[in-house]
Image (spheres, rainbow, N blue to C red):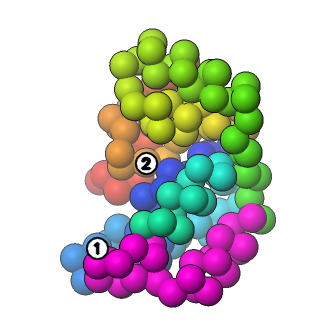
Amino acid sequence: MRFVDTNILLYGVSTVPGEASKARVARRLLQADDLALSVQVLQEFYVQATRVGRRDRLRHDQAALLIESWLRFPVQETTVPLVQAALETRRRYRMSYWDAAIVEAARLLECTTLLSEDFAHGRDYDGVRVENPFLG
């Protein structure tokens, strides 16, 4: 299983000309059936996709329908054990809590790959390896 970070979802709906190549990659990725995500990722997507000032801003109903469609993937809920694991990962790797929660959500879903451009490509967090799908 591969865990999808928020930026993949956002590029998947982007209509910004400068993001066209990343949008193609993200749309192709989102057609796969081996993906997983978390409630945090869905929340971040909604906030960013509907944000005032975003050039290709989505309406509430558009964003909600997309989120509904992505519920076909396994979704890690935010739980006390997830928070505790994220706090430890945050301390250990000196990263933000939110990034640590992404790593730990991936781990809880038994994902070995974290698809993201926001983490260092190739970095391994004890079995969760980062892959930037937009490189190359």
Of residue 24 and residue 55, the one placed in the foreground of this image is 55
Name the residue type under label 1: Glu
Which image quarter: residue 93? Answer: top left
Tag on residue 99? Answer: none
Asked if residue 20 can be seen in this view, the reply is no
Asked if residue 80 can be seen in this view, the reply is yes
Secondary structure state at the residue bearing disc 2 = loop
Secondary structure state at the residue bearing disc 1 = helix
Q: Is residue 89 above or below residue 11?
A: above
State the image coordinates of residue 97 (x, y, percent, origin top left): 46, 31
Q: Residues within 10 Å of mark 2 (few under 14, many from 20)?
A: some
Q: Where are the magenta residues, as a range?
A: 49-71
On whether residue 56 falls in the magenta region, the answer is yes
Name the residue type under label 2: Ser
Give the residue at mark 1.
19
Q: Is residue 43 above or below residue 122?
A: below
Q: Is residue 23 above or below residue 124?
A: below
Would residue 108 be found to the left or right of residue 41 on screen?
right
State the image coordinates of residue 22 (x, y, percent, origin top left): 35, 68
Give the residue at mark 2.
116
Of residue 78 and residue 11, the one placed in the foreground of this image is 78
Residue depicted at x 38% and y 26%: 95
Q: Residues within 10 Å of mark 1 (few under 14, many from 20)?
A: few
Which image quarter: residue 57? Answer: bottom left
Would residue 131 be found to the left or right of residue 111 on screen?
left
